[in-house]
Amino acid sequence: MNYVDYNFKWLINRIRGKSRDDIFNHIKNNYLNLPQSTKKAIENFLNDYGYWGKLDYENNEYEEIWNKTETFYYHLDDLEWLYEHLGDYRSKKLLFAILYNWYDYDFNTLKSLMDNTYCHYFDLDLISCNNEVLVDVGAYTGDTTLDFIKSYGTNNYKKIYCYEMTPNTFRQLKENLREYPHIVCKCKAVSDKNDILHMQSNNVSSSANFLCDSGEEIDAVSLDLDIEEAITMIKMDIEGAEEKAILGAKNHILNNHPKLLISVYHNHEDIWKIAKTIDSICEGYHFFLRFYGNYIFPTEIVLFGIYDNNN
C-alpha cells in the first residue's frame, strides 16, 4: 500500500461508523476553530454562489456542513468506488485532498495539487486531439473553446458546438469566436430532453446562472436529439445540471465514446455521482480528476472520462 492509498484509507476509516451528528459536529468544530477572516472568506464565497448550502456561523446557519455530512454518512462506499476507478495517483491524491478539506479543513494538500501547467480542461498528458467534434456545454464567452484552440491549434477540430443559455453572454460568445471557422453557437440550455426550462440569474456573475423551477424561460435540448453527427469530445460546466445533460447524451456516449471533461464541484455529490452515471451508461471509461480552482473551498474540479478503446 503506497502513501496515497494509506492516507485515503485512514480518512475513510476515521469517518466510517460515526453517526451523522458526530460527523456534523466534527466538521462544525473544525470550522469554528478557523481564523475569523478565513471563515468569512468561505462564507462570502459559498453564500454568493449558493450551490453548496448556506453557511453563517454568526447566525448558527450550517446547511453547507450538513450537506457534506450527508455525503460522508451515506456515500462512503461511492467515494471508495471512485477512488478505485481513478486512473492515476494524482487523481487519487486529489480526491483525498478534497475530502480531507471537507472533513478537517486541510488547505495545504489541496493547494499542492492546483494545476497551473495546462489550460483548464485541457491536460495534454491526458487529452490528445485529432479532427475533433467538440461540444462546449456552458460555453460562457468562449473561454474554453479559445483554450482548446490555444492548446491544440485550429487544425485539430472538425467542428465545435457551443451552447450558452444566457442571451447577453451568448452575444459576447459569438463575437469572441466570429473569426474561427466551423463553430456553431446555440443560445440554449442542455438537459436530458428537449424542453422549456427556467433560468435563475446570479448576482455575482452570469457564468453562475443556473436552471431552476422558476425564472426566465429558456429553450433546452438534449445532445442526442440536437446533434446528429458523431461527437468526439464533450466539455460541461453548467452549475450542477451536468448529470441531466450527460443522460441526454447517453447515445453519443454509448456509440461514439467521446472524451468527457465534466465539472463536478457544484454540489457535494457530483464528485462521485457523475463518474457512476457515465459508467452506468457505458462501461470502459477510465476516470481522472484535475483541480484548477480555490484551495480554501475546492472549486473548478474536472472529471475526465477517457474511453479505453482496447476494452
Image (spheres, grey):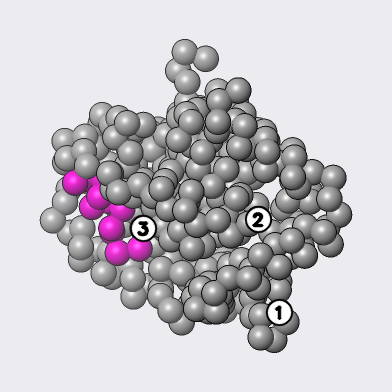
The numbered mark, 2 or 1, whose residue comes first in the sequence reads: 1
Q: Which mark is residue 7?
A: none
Name the quadrant containing residue 156. Answer: top left
Q: For the magenta stretch, what is the residue range?
A: 139-150
Name the residue: 55% across, 43% down.
95
Q: In the current view of this chain or complex, which residue is farthest to the top?
A: 310
x, y percent for residue 70: 76, 57
Which numbered dot is residue 61?
Answer: 1
Q: Is residue 215 above or below residue 221?
A: below
In the picture, which quadrant includes the N terminus? top right
Q: Is residue 250 left or right of residue 208?
A: right
Residue that badge 3 annotates: 139
Circle 1 SS class: loop
Closest to the observer: 291 or 132?
A: 291
Identify which amino acid the numbered label 3 is placed on: Ala
Amino acid type, callout 2: Tyr
Q: Residue at 28% of width from left, 44% of height from top?
A: 118
3 or 2: tag closer to the N-terminus: 2
Measuring 86% from the left and 54% from the top, which residue is drawn there?
A: 19
Left or right side of 291 for 143:
left
- Tell me whether the residue at label 3 lies in contact with that at label 2, contact meaning CB atoms closer than 8 angstroms: no
Magenta span includes 99? no
Q: Are marks 2 and 1 in contact (CB under 8 Å)?
A: no
The residue carrying mark 2 is 103
Q: Nearer the viewer, residue 231 or 82?
A: 82
Query: Element under label 3?
Result: loop
**Relative side of 144 to 270, left or right:** left
Q: Magenta span: helix, strand or loop, mainly?
A: helix
- The percent position of residue 124, horizontal first and vertical second, equals 29, 35
Does the image show residue 123?
yes
